[in-house]
């Protein structure tokens, strides 16, 4: 983590309590969809054949570089996620734990940009990322408030068999500076935080409390930010 991120993390006094969750929601979603049907597939060839969802996505069209995929206002500016190259737009061609058949999909390389005082700061670069959503509209970051800084979560998928995975950006309320967060849990460093769909992370006495969406089957554990 760079110096700015370390400072922002210390402002938050951020720690993550991972509560045990034994729920197993691995059954595919089978709700009927009126968004796309397989017969509508145009079959554009993907440039991401090794993505996690490659076997269940049909690419329909290609969007230009700079397409906005997520955005939210901050205390002093705006966080924006844009495609850093061409973005593939498509749909799920089969029901699964990732979503309903016909859900909209977006794949590409993206940049998370912090806009403040007329300047743009690249906060993070997300390679070969897949968004799965029920709408074509850009999604919003979800925010957890802290006294001196806020944490903004970017969650590319709206559902999942083992909870949701989100990227976290911390933004200083005083000067608008932003930095990505990484987490360590049981010795493993991750760029994302997994949480249960029914339990969004929250601020409790200055700590970020998270209930994992995976079937942990273990006692409470603590994940810390990479220093």
Image (cartoon, rainbow, N blue to C red):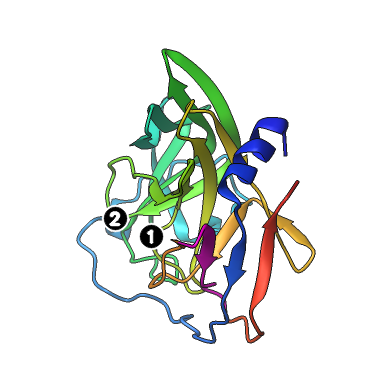
Viewer-closest of 209 and 156: 209
Judged left or right of residue 198, residue 148 is right
The x and y percentages for residue 65 are 46, 24
Residue carrying label 1: 158
| Element type where label 2 sits in the image | loop
The x and y percentages for residue 143 are 40, 49
**Is the N terminus in the top left, top right, bottom left or bottom right quadrant?**
top right
Residue at 72% across, 33% down: 2
C-beta proximity under 8 Å, tags 1 and 2? yes
10 Å crowding of disc 1: few (<14), some (14-19), many (20+): some
Determine if the magenta segment contains residue 102.
no
Residue at 32% across, 76% down: 30
10 Å crowding of disc 2: few (<14), some (14-19), many (20+): some
Judged left or right of residue 32, residue 146 is right
Residue carrying label 2: 134
Vertical placement of residue 36 versus 62, above or below:
below
Determine if the magenta segment contains residue 211.
yes
The x and y percentages for residue 167 are 54, 49
Residue at 49% across, 25% down: 175
The x and y percentages for residue 133 are 35, 54
What are the residue bounds of the magenta stretch? 204-214
Q: Which mark is residue 224?
A: none
Vertical placement of residue 219 versus 204, above or below:
below
């Amino acid at each position: 983590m760079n110096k700015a991120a370390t400072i922002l993390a210390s402002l938050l006094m951020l720690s993550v309590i991972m509560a045990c969750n034994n729920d197993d929601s691995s059954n595919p979603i089978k709700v009927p969809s009126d968004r796309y049907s397989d017969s509508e597939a145009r079959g554009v060839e993907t440039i991401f054949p090794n993505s996690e969802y490659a076997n269940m996505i049909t690419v329909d069209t290609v969007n230009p570089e700079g397409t906005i995929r997520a955005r939210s206002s901050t205390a002093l500016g705006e966080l924006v996620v844009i495609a850093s190259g061409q973005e593939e737009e498509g749909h799920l061609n089969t029901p699964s734990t990732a979503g309903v058949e016909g859900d909209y999909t977006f794949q590409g390389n993206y940049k998370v940009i912090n806009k403040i005082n007329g300047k743009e700061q690249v906060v993070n670069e997300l390679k070969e990322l897949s968004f799965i959503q029920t709408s074509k509209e850009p999604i919003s970051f979800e925010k957890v408030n802290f006294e001196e800084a806020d944490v903004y979560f970017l969650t590319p998928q709206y559902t999942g068999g083992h909870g949701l995975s989100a990227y976290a950006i911390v933004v200083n309320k005083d000067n608008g500076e932003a930095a990505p967060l990484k987490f360590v849990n049981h010795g493993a460093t991750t760029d994302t935080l997994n949480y249960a769909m029914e339990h969004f992370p929250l601020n409790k006495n200055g700590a970020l409390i998270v209930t994992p969406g995976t079937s942990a089957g273990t006692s409470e554990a603590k994940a810390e930010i990479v220093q």
